[in-house]
Image (cartoon, rainbow, N blue to C red):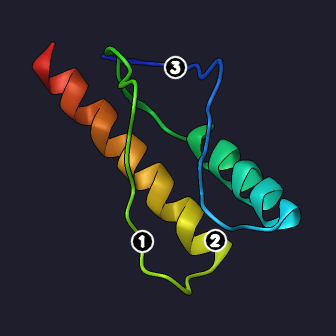
Amino acid sequence: MTAAVRVDRLSLHAGALSEAQARRLAELVGLALGRVSLPAAGVPRDVSVTVPAGGSVEQLAESVVRAIEAALRVDGAST
């Protein structure tokens, strides 16, 4: 069974990004999460992502989305 995932509020703390980079990161993560289809489950409160320094905003967004997807799958498997 799958259900739509609704994110009411998502806070990203991404270190020393410029305002333009932070806006782009939020846009990319939001767009990618809009395409996520996962089992209905409780949503994790916090997800931490560690990425190597020097990566692009696009790589960071991809890492964030993968971590959120993984956390949702784990929560879905445990319910």
Badge 3 marks a residue whose secondary structure is: loop
Residue at screen point 62% across, 36% down: 11
- Asked whether 31 or 13 is in front, the reply is 13
**Residue linked to disc 2:** 58
Q: Disc 3 vs disc 2: which is toward the camera?
A: 2
Residue most extreme to the bottom: 54
Q: Tell me which residue sits at (50%, 39%) in the image.
A: 36
The Cα atoms of the two marked residues, 1 and 2, are separated by 12 Å
Task: Give the foreground label among 3 and 1.
Answer: 1
Q: Is residue 52 left or right of residue 78?
A: right
For the residues carrying marks 1 and 2, which lies nearer the camera in this image? 1
| Tally of numbered discs | 3
Amino acid of disc 2:
Glu
Q: Residue at x 67, y 67 (%)?
A: 16
Q: Tell me if label 3 and label 2 are in contact, CB under 8 Å.
A: no
Q: CA gap, disc 3 to disc 1?
A: 28 Å
**Could you give the CA–CA distance between mark 3 and mark 2, rounded to whole angstroms?**
24 Å
Q: Is residue 19 left or right of residue 28?
A: right
In this view, which residue lies farthest toward the right? 20
- In the displayed structure, 45 sits above or below 14; it is above
Q: Is residue 30 left or right of residue 14?
A: right
Q: Which residue is mark 1?
A: 51
The quadrant of the picture occupied by the C terminus is top left
Q: SS of the residue at dot 2? A: helix
Q: Which mark is residue 4?
A: 3
Of the residues under marks 1 and 2, which one precedes in the sequence? 1
Tag 1: amino acid: Val
* Element type where label 1 sits in the image: loop
Query: Residue 39 in the image: x percent, y percent?
Result: 32, 23
Closer-to-camera residue (62/20): 20
Q: Give the mark nearer the N terminus: 3 vs 2.
A: 3
Q: Residue at x 70, y 58 (%)?
A: 25
